[in-house]
Amino acid sequence: MRFVKSLLLLFIFSFVIPHFSIVQAQETFGGDYMLVQYILEDYGYREVMHFELFADGDTSGTYKQLYSEQPDSGTFYYFVQEDRSFIIPEEDGIIYGIGDDQGDVFTFVRADSEFAMFAVGIRKSSGKTVADLSGDYWVSEFITEPDFQAAGLGYVTFDGSGYATLYRIENTVGDVDSVEFPYAVGDDGTVVFDNFLVGALSPDGQYLVAAGSEIEDNGSTYVMAVKKSSGLENSVLSGNYIYNQVRTETGGFSEENVFYAGLNYDGEGSAEATMFLGEPLSETFSYEILNEGNIEIDSSLGAVSADGRYYFSIDMGDTTGVAFGMGIQSAGNPAGFGSDHVGSMPSSFTLEQNYPNPFNPVTVIGYRLSAVSDVELSVYNLLGQKLVTLVSKKQSAGVYQVE
């Protein structure tokens, strides 16, 4: 097929009613959350932001910024797929994310020509005390400033009464090997570290995220942690995951700073990754779970939760750039991609079902090309009139998405 013309006749007033499994996934994402967000803007500015977020378990929610002199607030719409991946349409872009099977933890990313964004949200919990944060946790540190990027893997020992010690194992942060600090846990699961980092503890106490509450000189600190677990094997990481990552670099910016991918772990030490944003990319890599839940993924380091539902990883690189990200187990192959796609190039031309459907104001159209083709992707109304041409160019074999 050398020339694909009028690849899609999309009637903008018609839709397919979602079946029950999609509704079920939608309801999983609901309640009150603490959201910690990292932003990298194209001119080098970096910041972290904290939000209170409410999702209604249907398609809408509200957000309110915390620790800000002029807090931002508003509403948003979200659409959850069968595999618990979701999108949040915005006027000038779209956010891609994934939530876990309990609806307790989610992560998302966004990339465009102006900024990259990465965020982790944790459901609030009532009745929490400082004793709920106790024991050893693997922890990642990400420190970014205009001329300096640093990352480190270590562990924190929480004593259950309000004091903790951080032990750095491998890092580019500096020469200090251990740091003592106080911590507090609020009734809703909010965590405060030494009045500098603020975050949230997951309802099961297995995972936490935090970031600087006061950012100066265009710098930021972002921390993720997973409780240590002994006796874990490679089989803990098994099945399909969706992984979000942001990379920070000194000077320069591109949409490649954001990584949104489907990962398939075989439970034996090998995995496949297929990127959803940017140019099609499919590659294999190795992984190994070490002593107490810490992991090596090719050249990256990280840690996995005892049940394998989520993990974080970091690429320490050097002082010019570091990467950090989080993966959450999905309920099947990523939405919009069949089982024959992950880890392989398309064997035939395919037009995927657009999602969300119905949509307001954005929908995503996916398609695959098995060979180099001249592609035209157009939208028509119910009268058969062409409204807009979204794509009209030669494209190589691969997988594509258009908003």
Image: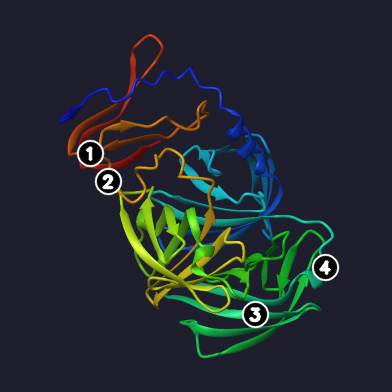
Q: Residue at x 53, y 70 (%)?
A: 233
Instruction: Name the front one of labels 3 and 1.
Output: 1
Q: Is residue 229 left or right of residue 268?
A: right
Give the residue pinned by disc 4.
Answer: 129
Instruction: Name the quarter where the C terminus is drawn.
Output: top left
Q: Earlier in the sequence, mark 4 or mark 1?
A: 4
Q: Are marks 3 and 2 in contact (CB under 8 Å)?
A: no
How many residues crowd mark 1 within 10 Å: few (<14), some (14–19), many (20+)? some
Tag 2 residue: 345
Q: Is residue 382 above or below residue 338?
A: above
Q: Is residue 354 left or right of residue 169?
A: left
Closer to the chain start, of discs 2 and 1, is: 2
Q: At label 3, which amino acid type do we have?
A: Val
What is the spatial separation of the Cα atoms under label 3 and label 2, in whole angstroms? Answer: 43 Å
Tell me which amino acid carries mark 2.
Met
Disc number placed over residue 156 in the picture, else none: 3
- Residue 60: image quadrant is top right
- Residue 131 x %, y %: 81, 72
- The quarter of the picture where residue 193 lies is bottom right
Secondary-structure class at tag 2: loop
Rendering coords of residue 369 (x, y %): 25, 37
Q: Is residue 246 above or below residue 142?
A: above
Task: Check contact, mark 2 vs mark 1: CB within 8 A.
Answer: yes
